[in-house]
Image (cartoon, rainbow, N blue to C red):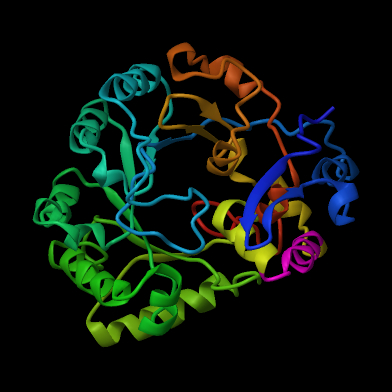
């Protein structure tokens, strides 16, 4: 039996008071995600390997984006301690896990962020940092981040909702587009995204509403052409589907688009995308050290079906676990698929 939470409740505050959205067949009238997998011949969804070690180092952020599935913002106090970071280092030191993916919030706001990067590089790990760009300009103490990233050969993955100010600012706040452009120019200035450079700069696109992203290659070509007007270059664009959790779920419910969006995701279910979901090759670590199948399960507090804290990290057990699935998983299997690295098929 696939591990799933049949009646996951999301409590939302609305002008009419608190309501609950149930992620189950009875509530929204669609097939369950595990039944789709059963149709494919999977009695459970298993990892293929653990290649990416994704760590949320805290939910504090200098922005409050409308689509944020982490519900991050300046008022969040959840911050990973140095002790937990050390447990992460010790857990993967002698494993074949090569890539560590640092996320938040704004991961750079963790007071031990730079120490963590340095220690991870010291044990030979490749590092991805999911940077919101504006953090580079938020405070003088962050202005040297491009140089810090360059020094440690960090792969910078940056969210840029669109190549115009109107759409970007609508999703992320007034003035974000202009600050993002300036930050990208600063990253380019130290070598990021250049053809003759090994410094990787990737952008992330999320749809602005309740619809699936367009073709990733076409979007990448559009972004590259439009950003050339600002003398900006980058390597890849990742098109990521908005999953129906947290702030985006609240938007869907308040705009009466929840049912339609779920129908769209289900109707676009792609078995090939289901085979390549990121949870099969990733383990996600919460700010408090608890382990999850993916970043989205982390936000729903659905811990792994195995030893569930970094202090008890057991890579063999984790590789053999059943992955927890639920209705939000339709977001990763719709169309060309979706992952933290963009489309999967």
Which percent across, then down, holds residue 140? 9, 56
Residue 53 among magenta residues: no
Which percent across, then down, holds residue 12? 64, 52
Q: Does residue 183 appear anywhere in the picture?
A: yes
Q: Does residue 345 appear anywhere in the picture?
A: no
Q: Residue at x 49, y 18 (%)?
A: 309
Q: Residue at x 72, y 69 (%)?
A: 257
Which percent across, then down, holds residue 100? 38, 36
Q: Residue at x 24, y 56 (%)?
A: 199
186 or 122: nearer the eye? Answer: 186
Vertical arrangement, residue 173 with respect to residue 137, above or below: below
124 or 314: nearer the eye? Answer: 314
Vertical arrangement, residue 241 with respect to residue 49, above or below: below
Which percent across, then down, holds residue 151? 13, 46
Q: Residue at x 43, y 62 (%)?
A: 65
Query: Please, what is the dominant secondary structure of the magenta stretch?
Result: helix
- What range is drawn magenta here? 255-266
**Figure quadrant of residue 262:** bottom right
């Amino acid at each position: 039996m696939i591990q799933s939470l049949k009646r996951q409740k999301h409590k939302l505050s609305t002008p009419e008071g608190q309501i609950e959205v149930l992620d189950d067949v009875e509530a929204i009238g669609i097939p369950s995600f595990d039944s789709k997998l059963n149709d494919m011949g999977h009695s459970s969804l298993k990892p293929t390997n653990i290649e990416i070690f994704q760590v949320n180092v805290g939910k504090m952020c200098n922005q409050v984006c409308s689509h944020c599935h982490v519900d991050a913002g300046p008022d969040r106090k959840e911050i990973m301690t140095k002790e937990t970071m050390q447990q992460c280092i010790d857990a993967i030191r002698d494993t074949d896990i090569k890539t560590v993916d640092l996320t938040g919030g704004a991961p750079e706001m963790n007071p031990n962020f730079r120490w963590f990067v340095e220690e991870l590089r010291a044990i030979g790990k490749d590092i991805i940092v999911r940077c919101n760009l504006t953090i580079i300009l938020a405070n003088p103490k962050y202005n040297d981040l491009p140089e810090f990233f360059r020094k440690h050969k960090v792969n910078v993955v940056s969210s840029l909702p669109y190549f115009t100010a109107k759409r970007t600012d609508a999703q992320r706040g007034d003035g974000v587009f202009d600050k993002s452009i300036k930050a990208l120019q600063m990253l380019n200035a130290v070598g990021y995204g250049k053809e003759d450079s090994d410094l990787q700069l990737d952008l992330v696109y999320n749809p602005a509403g309740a619809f699936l992203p367009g073709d990733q290659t076409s979007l990448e070509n559009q972004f590259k052409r439009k950003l050339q007007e600002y003398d900006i270059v980058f390597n890849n664009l990742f098109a990521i589907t908005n999953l129906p959790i947290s702030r985006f779920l609240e938007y869907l419910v308040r705009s009466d688009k929840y049912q339609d969006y779920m129908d769209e995701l289900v109707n676009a279910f792609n078995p090939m995308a289901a085979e390549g979901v990121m949870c099969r090759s990733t383990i996600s670590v919460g700010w408090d050290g608890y382990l999850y199948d993916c970043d989205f399960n982390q936000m729903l507090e659905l811990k792994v079906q195995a030893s569930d804290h970094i202090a008890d990290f057991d890579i063999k057990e984790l590789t053999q676990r059943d992955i927890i699935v639920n209705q939000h998983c339709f977001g990763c299997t719709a169309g060309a698929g979706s992952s933290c690295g963009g489309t999967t098929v």
